[in-house]
Amino acid sequence: MNAEILGIIFMFLVTVAIGIPLGRYMARVYAGEKTILDFLAPIERFFYRISGIDPTKEMNWKESMLAMLTINLVWYVLCFILLVVQQWLPMNPDKNPNMLPDQAFNTAISFLVNCDLQHYSGESAATYFTQLAVMMFLMFVSAGTGLAAAAILMNALKLRTTTQLGNFYDYFLKSCTRVLLPLSIVLAVVLMLNGMPMTFHGKDTITTLQGDTVQVSRGPVAAFVPIKHIGTNGGGFYGANSTHPLENPSYLTNFILMVSQCILPFAIVFALGFYLKKHKFPWMVFGVMTIGFLCLVIPTVISEVQGNSAIIKMGIDNSSGAMEGKEVRFGAPASGYWAIMTTVISTGSVNCMHDSTMPLSGMNEMWAMMVNCFYGGKGVGFLNFYIFIIIAVFMSGLMVGRTPEFHGKKIEAKEMKIASIVALWHPLLILAFAAIACFVYVHYPVRYAYWLNNPGYHGFSEMLYEYTSSSANNGSGFEGLGDTPSKFWNVTCGFVLIFGRYLPIIGQIAIAGSLAGKKFIPESAGTLKTDTVTFGVMVFAVIVIIAALSFFPALSLGPIAEHFSMNTNSIIR
Amino acid sequence: MKKYILPSIMLSVVSMLVFVVLYTLIVWGIGYFVAPNHGDGEVVTVNGKVVGYKLVGQSFTQAKYFNGRPSATAPVYNASASGGSNKGPSNPDYLKGVQAAIDTFMVHNPTIKKEDVPVELVTMSGSGLDPDISPKAALVQIPRIAGVRHLSEDKITALVNKHIEKPFLGPAHINVLLLNVDLDKLQ
């Protein structure tokens, strides 16, 4: 077990070691400087010529957002149509049927917003064509969209006064061609060397050693999985996601996939420092994020290694930890680590079933998504963190009696209003929709009681988790929730996904755009320093007060109540 | 918005060509040469006949084989519908099921003490297709298999030890299918 703990520490260090140089590279890409992949420029020019885009024409923040929303709408319409007619399209060796409209709505939205919440199983409800042309396509472009938004923010933070913040299409395309595509190809090769299938053949029927007849689903998995992790998307090729042995064949691939899903969220923080030539600032941000991450991951790994107290009482050998929903080749420590990493960075791929993790682990998984800015998804994680920086700057300014300034720009009422709305929007979505689901569940038990796979507090956690995952655009789930055939969940989650993605991004970019246009005030002795430990503590406090505590009552009803009911029976009863 | 629509559509079309068609062909082309079995998945054969995929667990319920972990798919180890039980840790029905699995194991392996039954043998994997068991989970089954097959326990223990895989910093595990294929050869 100690070696396995070393294993997860090693995973973290490798990620940081790759993240820093990758961040330097990305800063150069977005600044338009020379990079090693400049030979791709003709391909990009081909893109622009065909689509009639002038990549050198700069946009203000409103034009960028309009361009983003338009192209997202185009992708949505295209992908929705492909999903509802998939049965008649080529590359469907397993003869899977068309998706129903409510399911296609949920699926197209979910992949479009980089969430990849899945109310279907890839083996039986998607074809190879839609897996590639819908799911995989959206995984590339939604990750590109998030990175483009981060690039606009970086541009806006430059020390000058302007309304022109680069070209959205240029940032988007370069994110895809210069970052996502090359990383995905390299990763695909490594994964195939480790046994991941890449085939267009359908199910294979075999007779097992014991004489049973079994059908084995295969498919173009090795093309799908790299971008699933590089782009922090997380939608599984198979229903069981990264627990499936063909989607995550060994401890080594688990290690590689874990690292590959964290490198971009880490890199974007460092990219900011290289881009703005401010080398202390990213370490403040990264430090706050890492402390938050450690607060979540350490108790989770401990509770998974300890195992289920109810099973310990049965008197068997529990030294492997909590093994329900886990795979032997990964073990409990690496599964607990993955459970938190995938929820803090909004990937949402799972290498163990979160529904079966211990109550406090489930709480930490939810908390990671509720805070949604410890690392965060590529691009948007830092955008969320930016909101908390704005609030922290404002509050610190009030506390010490200085004008709140960030990077030489005054923060005024308009920015604070937007920041407050964005910060409170996430709790509102999660808690309001969870309340509606509970209401429907209680008042229409005959029609809806099949929802829950588990009774009591844990059942409540299943519903709360689903909306948390939707609003945070995460995509993992307490998969016992009977959401697969349910119109209610398809439609409500679909709307939470839309609201949870676009309103925050627009708000964040609006603040950035508004600040960029303001008069630049050079740093003086009176300026609040934002790259110090003191300010880091302040940001952390703001995050805890706003993001974490607003959810505490709801969490008390779910995982916390479950934990105490399991472990201190004598006190409760 | 209007002036953004046409560029968006054209950009989407080219993106589709590059990120879906071109990228997939590149990966598939490389995979044909580097992935096992040209990318079709590595198979295990006995006397020239395919008996399974190396990575995909299969159901072993007979007493003469090393049994794998319980599976939540329907039917068990259904490799075209993966998934876990998704039972919460405090679910009373689930806990009854675990107790029943322990009791069943004790009936089939009467020489084993209860405190030696490893938890992974009575809990279901996340995929329902876990190809592996831990070395402990193999060792507790040796007396039963030795009895059924009339082999010495030492011989089987040696075979089990030969099959232990220990990845760098990862947990030790044994591929059940490969172990059972070699077990059949012991006769």
Image (cartoon, coloured by chain):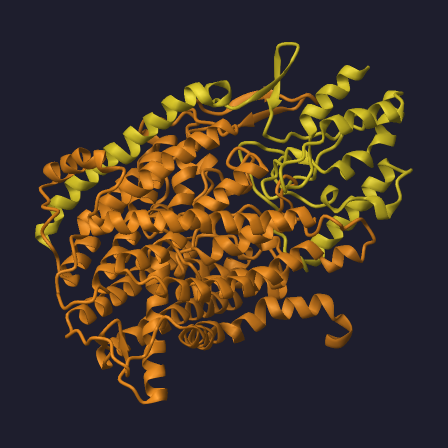
Q: Nearer the viewer, residue A379 or A445?
A: A379
Could you say where residue B148 lies in the image, as x and y percent from the top left? 87, 24
Is residue A285 among what the camera can see?
Answer: yes
Left-right relation of B186 to A426: right
Residue in the picture at 91% in, 38% down:
B111
- A323 sits to left or right of A26: right
Which residue in the rendered view is the most extreme toward the bottom?
A: A401
Quarter containing the C terminus of chain A:
bottom right
Instruction: State the hue of chain B.
Output: yellow
Among the 4 quarters of the image, the one containing residue A345: bottom left
Q: Would residue B157 be found to the left or right of residue A411 on screen?
A: right
Q: Residue A221 appears at what percent x and percent y?
A: 44, 32
Q: Nearer the viewer, residue B40 or A203?
A: B40
Question: Which residue occupies the foreground of this view, A511 or A565?
Answer: A511
**Residue B77 picture location, percent across and down:** 62, 33
Vertical arrangement, residue A99 with respect to residue A512, above or below = above
At horizontal 62% and vertical 10% (from top left) the residue drawn is B48
Asked if residue A488 is positioned above or below residue B54 in the image, the reply reads below
Give the answer, above or below, for where A32 lies relative to A569: above
Chain with colour orange in the figure: A
Can residue A119 be spotted in the picture?
no
